[in-house]
Amino acid sequence: MRAVMLGLCTAMVLMARVADAKMPLPAAKPPDGATLFKQQCAVCHTTNLSEPMRQGPPLVKIVGRTAGKIDGFHYSDGLAKADFIWDEARLDAWLTNPQAVIPGVIMAYRQGKPETRAAIIGYLKELN
């Protein structure tokens, strides 16, 4: 009797393992824009005007703002002379390769993943 019980228990454990193996794992949730901003941008940029300036300008209300024009921040010559408004397309190009948008700028960050750029830009839009 004991051997039968042990056999049944072993069979049940094996069946549970097979069932677990067939069940798909839940997909990993991609980080949201706020998390990505904190991980990749916040070392150089703030998201409000009350914090001290960092290496880069504050990015609060960046969408719709004239490039290179925020009081209290010293921009590179190229950005200071820029004549455009930040929109989603321009931000996407900037995050892809800032030097392609304005040659000679100091920002070295590049983000090759479109989904990461979109999440960061979405977060920046929320700050408007």
Image (cartoon, rainbow, N blue to C red):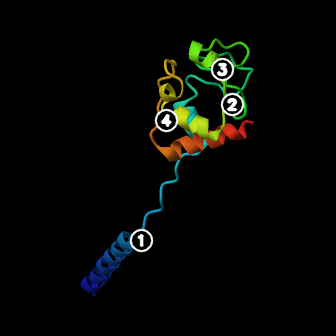
Crowdedness near tag 3: few (<14), some (14–19) or many (≥20) residues, C-alpha within 10 Å? many
- Answer with left or right where residue 9 lies relative to residue 117: left
Q: From the top left corner, tell me how far across and down residue 36 is, in percent.
A: 55, 38
Crowdedness near tag 2: few (<14), some (14–19) or many (≥20) residues, C-alpha within 10 Å? some
Task: Identify residue for label 1.
Answer: 23
Task: Identify residue for label 4.
Answer: 96
Q: Nearer the viewer, residue 90 or 74?
A: 90
Marks 1 and 4, the one that precedes in the sequence = 1
Crowdedness near tag 4: few (<14), some (14–19) or many (≥20) residues, C-alpha within 10 Å? some
Q: From the top left corner, tell me how far across and down residue 84 is, in percent.
A: 66, 28
Cα–Cα gap, marks 2 and 1: 49 Å
1 or 4: mark nearer the eye? 4
- Answer with left or right where residue 42 lies relative to residue 99: right
Crowdedness near tag 1: few (<14), some (14–19) or many (≥20) residues, C-alpha within 10 Å? few
Labelled pair 2, 1 in contact (Cβ < 8 Å)? no
Marks 4 and 2, the one that precedes in the sequence = 2
Cα–Cα gap, marks 1 and 4: 38 Å
User: Tag 4's secondary structure?
Assistant: helix
Marks 4 and 3, the one that precedes in the sequence = 3
Q: From the top left corner, tell me how far across and down residue 13 is, in percent.
A: 34, 74
Cα–Cα gap, marks 4 and 3: 18 Å
Q: Nearer the viewer, residue 128 or 38?
A: 128
4 or 2: mark nearer the eye? 2
User: Tag 1's secondary structure?
Assistant: loop
Name the amino acid, label 3: Gly
Task: Identify residue for label 3.
Answer: 68
Task: Identify residue for label 2.
Answer: 85
User: Tag 3's secondary structure?
Assistant: loop
